[in-house]
Image (spheres, helix red, strand yellow):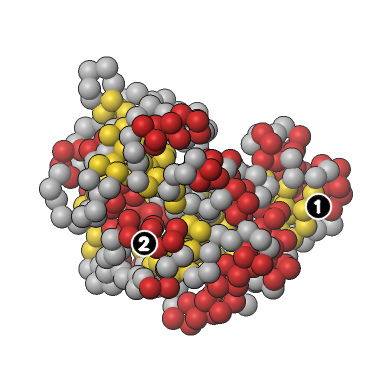
Amino acid sequence: MKLLIIGGGGREHAIAWKAAQSSRVEKIYCAPGNAGISQVAECVPIGVMEFDRLVEFAKEKEIDLTVVGMEDPLVGGIVDRFEKAGLRIFGPRQNAAVLEGSKAFAKNLMKKYGIPTAAYETFTSPEEALSYLETAKLPIVLKADGLAQGKGVLICNTREEARDGVKTLMLDQKFAAAGKEIVAEEFLTGREVSVLSFVDGNTIRIMTSAQDHKRAMDGDQGLNTGGMGTFSPSPFYTEEVDAFCKKYIYQPTVDAMKAEGRPFKGIIFFGLMLTPDGPRVLEYNARFGDPETQVVLPRLENDLVEVFEACIDGTLDSVDLKFDNSRATVCVMLASDGYPLAYQKGFPIYGLEKFQGLDGYYVFHSGTKFNEEGQVVTNGGRVLGVTANGSTLAEARENAYRATEWVSFENKYLRHDIGKAIDEA
């Protein structure tokens, strides 16, 4: 079969890499892709929001299945467009992708159906938000309602920070229309855990757990990013936590979306906080996480394409999802110094050949391209996800950091404490 993957980051590289292992796949295209993805797929210069061109391409190439990696096209309704054109596509329709597209929708859904989450208020008026924050309990979390590439969340420890947060999100519109409405949310404490799942509208199958590191600098300092590294599994995601979440969070979310007339087919990403009072939902995403995908898919034993098709066909209940529990995986992001603010790109990358044919080590490209001389160069804030397996999390972490030393480029930056929580488990 012919596969089209929509996106151009590390998540899409991991999806393409895993899909290429399927005996059913004969050809993979990726739009727009990147230098790393080109190793396993033919990259085509079509933007992720160019729906008409993507539909035309899928028809021209007789694509059997399209997989959407990124949130923007999902929230924009790409699945609806493809289905209307009679094309097979994996991902939630627009009315279900709102689970990620609007934090206010997600919070209201959880409140209505009793799914455990933090207390919150929503605001469309900056004046009302500022008035509320004058007496709200601190610290408090402010979130842009819409999509903001994982950066529209502000943790405010003082009244001044809260006022500045409203200014940033609603008045300065740093994240454009995403900040027209904001959520002011109770600050929760505990361990964060990411849990990805496959959903077919009725049935949910949980993938292995992971933990992301959002802050730019060591010690969870600095600005929020799209993710500076991750590990899987989380030692804090116990059987007890799993049982609670399956009963009160996972299936109830699927059932709630169906009850609202928004049946969800695709990936639901559960961002959880393991609080002293039990697990709480921090956020939903309507697609694979990045960089969580880079540590989850290397441990998946199933044929990924068969799972995609089961979700589309509503037969996920017949799938026995399996992960390699004998291995752990750690991913360390190599970024451009200055990310997530200002940074330079276009620098040659050296050492990528050291990963070729090496079992248990991977380098997933997040922001790369070929220059005019055909050399791989940096092309983003997050550049590479250096990933490694190990028999334990500690060993995987050691292997991943060793592998980061194989790669070099000007203004290379990384956190040095990805997976440090492993040592505390």
Q: Earlier in the sequence, mark 1 or mark 2?
A: 1
Identify whether 131 is placed above or below 170.
Answer: below
Residue sticking out furthest to the top: 372
User: Mark 1 packing: few (<14 Cα in 10 Å), some, or many (20+)?
Assistant: some
Mark nearer the viewer, 1 or 2 = 2
Viewed as shown, does residue 187 lie left or right of 20?
right
Identify whether 421 is placed above or below 2.
Answer: below
Viewed as shown, does residue 259 lie left or right of 419?
right
Identify whether 297 is placed above or below 15.
Answer: below
Residue 402, image x, y percentages:
22, 50
Residue 347, image x, y percentages:
31, 25
Look at 32% across and 28% down and name the residue there: 369
Residue labelled with disc 1: 133
Name the secondary structure under disc 1.
helix
Q: Amino acid at mark 2?
A: Val
* Residue 91, numbered circle: none
Q: Does residue 231 appear anywhere in the picture?
A: no
Residue labelled with disc 2: 307
Look at 51% across and 59% down and name the residue there: 265
Toward which corner of the image does residue 251 lie, by quadrant?
bottom right
As rendered, which of 283 and 213 lies closer to the eye?
283
Residue 99, image x, y percentages:
61, 55
Q: Does residue 64 appear anywhere in the picture?
A: yes
Viewed as shown, does residue 276 lie left or right of 314?
right
Q: Amino acid at mark 1?
A: Leu
